[in-house]
Amino acid sequence: MSNKVEVQTRNIRLTEKIEEYVNKKAGNLDHYMPAIDEARVEFSHHKAARDATDRNVAQITVFGKGFTLRTEERADEILAAFDQAIDNLQNQIERYKGKHHRGRGDGRSAAEVADDVIDEETGELSPLFARRKKFVLNPMSEDEAVVQMRNLGHDNFFIFYNAETSKINVLYRRRNGSYGLIEPELG
């Protein structure tokens, strides 16, 4: 077990049995992905939950260099929620590894590419942004933005000036094929 496991509780008493079980299971996550540095497990009990199966919540967050993965599961027993969360997290780790270790063309992983910030010839820091782009935003409705996004072949997102709200919006395609709209506000 090379990664650190931190266990927190809310409205629940942490017994030695639960802590041992959590440390054993969460401590082995580095077998799935050695880049995991720390795992944080949070248990909570919600008395006011309508359904008994939603009362015990197990939330697991893992941290590594350049990534954070999080999952939350609910069940009627706290260890059952934890087991479901561990299974879900293992699936997330496999998807993350698949996304970040393939498709680079030169065989390097995402972590190796991220380390290429220093120019080997000069020894100086390379610019973080490899490209800057400026473009004119024409006012349009949300429906027009969807049409423009399709016509331009933008698969992931499209930035536009919403004529109805007089604000810049981001239109994006969700995993299920529908669209989402981000409406930024200044904080």
Image: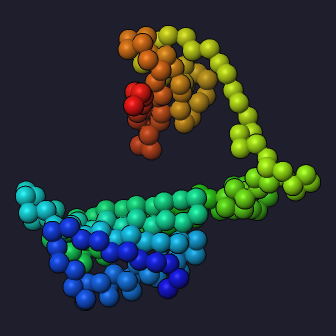
Q: Nearer the viewer, residue 183 or 16?
A: 16
Q: Residue 122 appears at what percent x and percent y?
A: 91, 52
Give the quadrant of residue 62: bottom left
* Left or right: where 92 falls relative to 135: left
Residue extending farthest to the right is 121
* Left or right: where 84 falls relative to 114: left
User: Relative to residue 172, is residue 55 depicted above or below?
Assistant: below
Total numbered labels:
0
Q: Residue 158 appears at what percent x and percent y?
A: 54, 27
The residue lying at 39 percent from left, 86 percent from top is 24
The residue lying at 62 percent from left, 14 percent from top is 136
- Can the viewer see residue 37? yes
The residue lying at 71 percent from left, 39 percent from top is 129
Which quarter of the rendering shows the C terminus?
top left
Q: Nearer the viewer, residue 186 or 32?
A: 186
Q: Residue 100 appears at what percent x and percent y?
A: 62, 59
User: Relative to residue 26, is residue 145 depicted above or below?
Assistant: above
* Left or right: where 172 falls relative to 20: right
- Can the viewer see residue 102? no
